[in-house]
Image (spheres, rainbow, N blue to C red):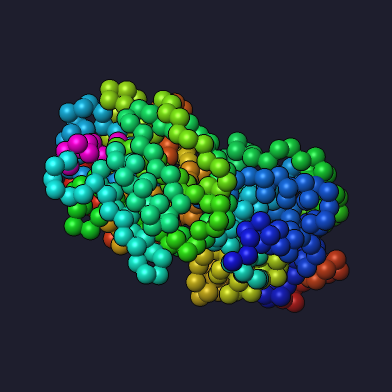
Amino acid sequence: MGSEPARFESVYRETYGRITAYAVRRCHSPQDAADVVAETFAIAWRRMGEVPDGEQATLWLYGVARKVLANHYRVEVRRQALNVELDAEMADLYQAAPDSGVELTAIAQIFRALPDTDRELLSLVAWEGLDRQQIAAVLGMSRNAVRIRLHRARRRFARALAEAGVHFTSESRLTPAEGHL
Amino acid sequence: MKNIDDIDEITRALARVEPGKPGGHASDAGARKLLVSIAAEQPGPSAIRLRPARRPAQRLALGLAGAGLLAVGIVVGPSLLKGSGTPSYAVTKEPDGVVYVQIRDFRDKAGLARRLKELNVPATVDYAPPGKWCQEPRGTSVQDIPRGLYSVPENIPGEEHSLGWQMRIDTKLFKPDQTFVWTISDHGTSTILMSGPVAPCVLVPDKSNEPKAGDKADYRLATTKGRSLAGFRVDEKTVGEVLPELKRRGLKVEYLIMAVAPDNPGGFGELRTQTEPVGDDWIVWEAEESILKPGLIRLLVTDKRFDRNPVYGGPRDNVVKE
């Protein structure tokens, strides 16, 4: 049996980039992101026995981070000592925020107004690049439930965009999208 | 309607950190500092404290004592068991190094310690009388407890109504300088695996779990008349079903993670108490309210459903009559 501290350190190094990206993509402020990252890994440390090996560890951590994010008591129980460096590193990631520009701002607003589960499903696909099986593991639902809910989430987002008159195609090349409607 | 690729493409464009790219780097100063600060924390579970199930007869005694406290658990004292002909403890060792310990009387600590030593179980045993507990910490808790080293204490088969408990210990899994530190009392058992020297037990007033007669414990049942969750049953509901009502009543929540022996004989261990949330699909077995911090609710939870409520060894209605 390998020692838990060594295993934790290896999981930490392996997943830190993805967990910080996950938190930064979802938190409004760098301090919140730093809190979510710190609390997520603190939970992993306390439950090292439950953390699966390999790629599954990342999915397990996404699941924990999601719960930490949803937890409004988090602020009260900030366990980690103030980590100025971490806050600064998170803040750097907010510099190149993409939702600038009129169209993207409008789209971001519509996106934020979607139900939480819709947003999380769409994000796990588009931001973390997960497939249905992986999303099922993160959210603790069946693969079929993921498939159905993802379909509905995409439909709701598309409808909301259409109702708002936002027409958008790929990347930054904004062109009329009537052809798809 | 836009097709799937378009929707995903639009979503991708919203990502603060570009998809496929990492956020921070584990080698950054803040990341290294975070790693060190987390690893300095004590990981759990390093200690398990056992609470036996509440039973109807015990509730009667509770009522007489005027202390309707869930944490009391056991009211029938060990003295009632004396003279019944059963030995106060039994320790048996299988050829494969597995030891079964059964304890019925919590006061013959010298005899038990001697027997454990004979069987090469490195252990210290202390008895804490009501209202007292050994001053903590007594040593360094082992952070890396091998799976299967010991089981959660459970009732002795066929003696469900006694105070006794038994546990299984695999002596092969001990490392050289480790000691099993047991503190037994009339109301529960604390089991901590420590490494290196262990300080002797210095009895101090127990401020954590001991509900003294006529005195107040830290937590009490929250779901009875006059309490903060009066009129709202939580037992056997999911966390997701319970939280909205707590929120509606403006209550804060923490979770006591229960450890239940495989065959759920009644009673449970306390793995840890945490404020970070658990899954909405976890099962709530009871709710307690903090006496020191009004408005704080502690949900007793497990990550899966059992065939009967471990807190009461069956339905709550058999024990708590309203």
Q: Which quarter of the image is occupied by the C terminus of chain B?
A: top left
Q: Is residue A98 above or below residue A177?
A: above
Res. B265 image quadrant: bottom left
The answer to whether B121 appears left or right of B139 in the picture is left
Q: Provide residue B72's location: percent of width, then percent of height.
A: 30, 36
Which portion, as a residue range, is magenta? B72-81
Q: Residue at x 80, y 40 (%)?
A: A84
Q: Residue at x 64, y 39 (%)?
A: A78
Q: Provide residue B183's location: percent of width, then percent of height.
A: 40, 40
Q: Which quarter of the image is occupied by the N terminus of chain B?
A: bottom right
Q: Residue at x 21, y 27 (%)?
A: B65
Q: Provide residue B262's location: percent of width, then percent of height.
A: 35, 62
Residue in the foreground of this view, choosing between A70 and B60 = B60
Q: Can I make out residue B6 in this image? A: yes
Residue in the foreground of this view, choosing between A61 and A119 = A61
Q: Provide residue B157's location: percent of width, then percent of height.
A: 23, 58
Res. A146 image quadrant: bottom right
User: Which residue sits furthest left?
Assistant: B84
Residue in the foreground of this view, choosing between B279 and A169 = B279
The answer to whether B84 appears left or right of B140 in the picture is left
Residue in the foreground of this view, choosing between B106 and A101 = B106
Marker count (numbered): 0
B76 falls in the magenta region: yes
B255 falls in the magenta region: no
Q: Can I make out residue A64 in this image? A: no
Q: Residue at x 40, y 52 (%)?
A: B117
